[in-house]
Image (tube, rainbow, N blue to C red):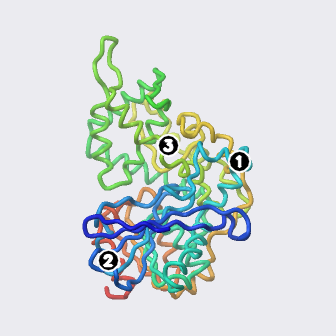
Amino acid sequence: MTVSYRQPGVVLTDHRFTVPLDHDDPAGESIELFAREAVASDKAHQDLPWMVYLQGGPGFGANRFVGKQAWLGRALKEFRVLLLDQRGTGHSTPANRQTLPLRGGPGAQADYLARFRADSIVRDCEAIRPRLTGGDPWTVLGQSFGGFCVVHYLSTAPEGLRAALITGGLPSLDAHADDVYRAAYPRIERKVAAHYARYPQDVERARQIADHLLRHETVLSNGYRLTVEAFQSLGILLGGGEGSHRLHYLLEEAFVRTPQGPALSDAFQEEVQGLLSYAGHPLYALVHEACYAQGDRPTAWSAERVRAEFPQFDAAKALADDGPLLFTGESVHPWVFDTDPALRPLRETAEELAARTDWRPLYDPARLAANEVPVAAAIYHDDMYVDPEHSLRTARAIGNLRTWVTDEFEHDGVRAGGSRVLDRLLALSRDEV
């Protein structure tokens, strides 16, 4: 049963689909997918081509837009848009600390979650596409991890695509997670240096907060243990267009005076809690490194191991050497399954996934080289989340792909740039620029 309703300028329709948990076993267990269709009010009864949007992450449901926000307004000028909650996210059979125990123990949970990567997401798309389009191909827009899914789509089911648009999401075709993080830490260091150049007063503020956390156990109101490593992970903000400014405003309200001396303010702790908690997107922590895994080599907590190769990120060493504290970026570490109450029950499951050695290949280089689907990809010049050099190498390996390399936007360009970014990608895919 579908339900339709209206927002300003838009008609929305909720769809629910049943798909196999394992597409290689279509008669086996099934899960539910949720997707929200959006169409412009004045085009609601027109026969429009479809665009499906794949959100970044992994682990995030599709955007909950109000009206024609961000890029959606541009898309609705010519498309009927499907905002898909990828499996395990949003309303699509959620996977979290509350639901995963239904699967059994950590081993069974890890087996289940191994089916929540790009390969399964693409097969979900192909399962529901004929039900909506009557079998016609559709255009896919993939942001960040959604772009990883698009490259898998081009590798395995290009016949389902009319065109492919990718924003900040061209993955390396063959890099292990270790390679991804070896490229990432120097980029993160550059972002931190740029932040401190913009806000030099934050150097001492960050050092003071780190020193306080090293000397005082701090537990936030939701039970999150705010360690110095967790504080450093707030550097994930620096990958967004407004992130440096948001981090600055956060740091400047860190301390208040109390009868017992300086203490971390309630306002600071409340905002940090919202930024660090994985309660709303636990799959991000669980399968983040697995989204790079291919073959028999385990990820084995790659970000944590590779960080040891960059001692400048050690907080205690930075304080002892009177140096600036370096923030970290988009990485998941084993300690987060101890600090975050939303993840603590899933620590053993995460260990099982980190040790797994039977990952399927995600990309087919030969098929990508022969690709005929029009592809347009935005590559952000100093993207903190996805290495631009990896992206450019992949762009050269995919046939019929045109790139737009820009420093106008950060990784969140499709949100910040809205219709301009989508306009550019559509024009590139149509060979109009």
Taking the image as shown, residue 194 lies to the left or right of residue 114, namely: left
**Label at residue 424:** 2
How far apart marks 2 and 1 lie (CA) works out to 42 Å
How far apart marks 3 and 2 lie (CA) works out to 35 Å
Say if 373 sits above or below 415 in the image: below
Q: Answer yes or no: do the residues labelled 2 and 1 have beta carbons within 8 Å?
A: no
Other residues around mark 1 within 10 Å, as few (<14) / some (14–19) / many (≥20): some
Which residue does the numbered mark 1 point to in the structure image?
352
**Residue 186 x/y as whole percent:** 46, 52
Which quarter of the picture shows residue 50? bottom left
Three-letter residue code for mark 2:
Arg
Other residues around mark 3 within 10 Å, as few (<14) / some (14–19) / many (≥20): some
Taking the image as shown, residue 160 lies to the left or right of residue 199, namely: right
Farthest residue, direction top: 259
Which quarter of the picture shows residue 203? top left
How far apart marks 3 and 1 lie (CA) works out to 20 Å
**Label at residue 236:** none
**Residue 149 x/y as whole percent:** 54, 69
Which residue does the numbered mark 3 point to in the structure image?
279
